[in-house]
Image: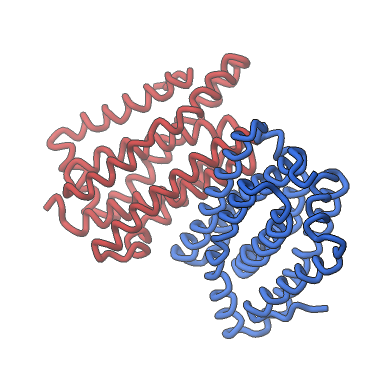
Chain colours: A red, B blue
Amino acid sequence: MSDSPAGVGDLLGVLAYAELTAFLRLAEDATRHAPSLADRAALGDLAATEYAHFRLLHDRLASLGIDPEEAMAPFVGPLDDWHTQTTPGDWLEALVKAYVGTGIALDFYREAAVHVDAETRRLVEEVLVDEGRSQFAVERVGAALKEDPTQSGRLALWARRMVGEALSQGQHVAAARPELAKLLVEAAGEDITRMFARLTEAHGERMAAMGLTPGP
Amino acid sequence: MSDSPAGVGDLLGVLAYAELTAFLRLAEDATRHAPSLADRAALGDLAATEYAHFRLLHDRLASLGIDPEEAMAPFVGPLDDWHTQTTPGDWLEALVKAYVGTGIALDFYREAAVHVDAETRRLVEEVLVDEGRSQFAVERVGAALKEDPTQSGRLALWARRMVGEALSQGQHVAAARPELAKLLVEAAGEDITRMFARLTEAHGERMAAMGLTPGP
């Protein structure tokens, strides 16, 4: 059951739309908020990587005989809502989003990829390899906090809001797409609590890397 | 004089920032206006190509020992102003901009590239090769006009506005960067009038390709 077409189509579909929309939103954030050309190019670089991932996933769907637009369609609403709820108001918020938002997404893909077929897993792992690319965001947020530690509180809140909104949208998706939810649950085995613990821990590590307290 | 570092740095600088900002703006237009996922992906594809060009130009500047950010800086104001003045209000305007705006830019690069050194010219030509990528915009605008010919007037006006704003910003750039203006004038030889005739003719052909009257 774990490599059922429905589950795999959903997994690749949500991944593909997540990458497409991350690409477009990062580009928008770069235009609006980057304080320098170098910063704009750096966030643009991240955006372009997301686009390359989108193409890989799109083509994989097509090669499986799954219509990419149909596979992405169920996830447009939740992912667009997530982005609307987490539209950055300034450059630091944009950086935290680029790092934390991408991190949450990557953790989710990693959990979901455990039980799919080998070829799909190989592809998901390829998409996951570039994780280090958002490292520049960590460095810039860290430097900004060193200069002005009072920013820490609001950025920690901002990051928490992103996680909260992700959980909220994730529940909508799980309710609407039981096949996808099953992939995750099967991946976690009996111990779904442990999976959430892993996700929370990874989020805490990212917060610490930026010099932010993860909060309760 | 024609391959003076100042002129070449300016040419690569304006090209690089034009590609970077085209990438970011196309991505924004795709997010805001694309009526379907396939359309969003198609405009995203165009945006990603602009980014790849930006990287080529950026790296060429660096390899010439020219700071890419410094080379781009003089053109940020005029190009940002052009985009602000030509922010599309809907999907058809976004498509016309993608095709006409890219076309104007490509014509300009072609004229300017004639008198630079061989290595830079090879690079500019590589960037020019992908022109056909905006062909999907032609097809979709043509189809929309077949369905509703009354759109033709406002889209023709919209395209004319883009040309007008381009000329206006081009004059600012030429006044501020005489080395770059000289490249263009030298490329045109004595006959700058003929160069403008070529640009106007190319614009007319693009308008006709979309089923729009170029206007007076």
Is the C terminus of chain A in the top left, top right, bottom left or bottom right quadrant? top left
User: Which residue is found at the position 54% from the left and 21% from the top?
Assistant: A153
Q: Position of residue A93 (x, y in %)?
A: 56, 32
Q: Position of residue B149 (x, y in %)?
A: 65, 85
Question: Viewed as shown, does residue B77 lie left or right of A54?
Answer: right
Q: Is residue B203 visible?
A: yes
Q: Quadrant of residue A189?
A: top left
**Camera-side residue: A136 or A74?**
A136
Q: Quadrant of residue B145?
A: bottom right
Question: Viewed as shown, does residue A43 lie left or right of B86?
Answer: left
Question: Viewed as shown, does residue B117 lie left or right of A130?
Answer: right
User: Which residue is found at the position 79% from the left and 47% from the top?
Assistant: B180
User: Which residue is found at the position 80% from the left and 44% from the top?
Assistant: B1
Q: Position of residue B203 (x, y in %)?
A: 72, 71
Say if B67 sits above or below B186 in the image.
above
User: Which residue is found at the position 39% from the left and 54% from the top?
Assistant: A55
**Camera-side residue: A137 or B113?**
B113
Q: Is residue B74 visible?
A: no
Q: Position of residue B121 (x, y in %)?
A: 64, 51
Count up the numbered dots.
0
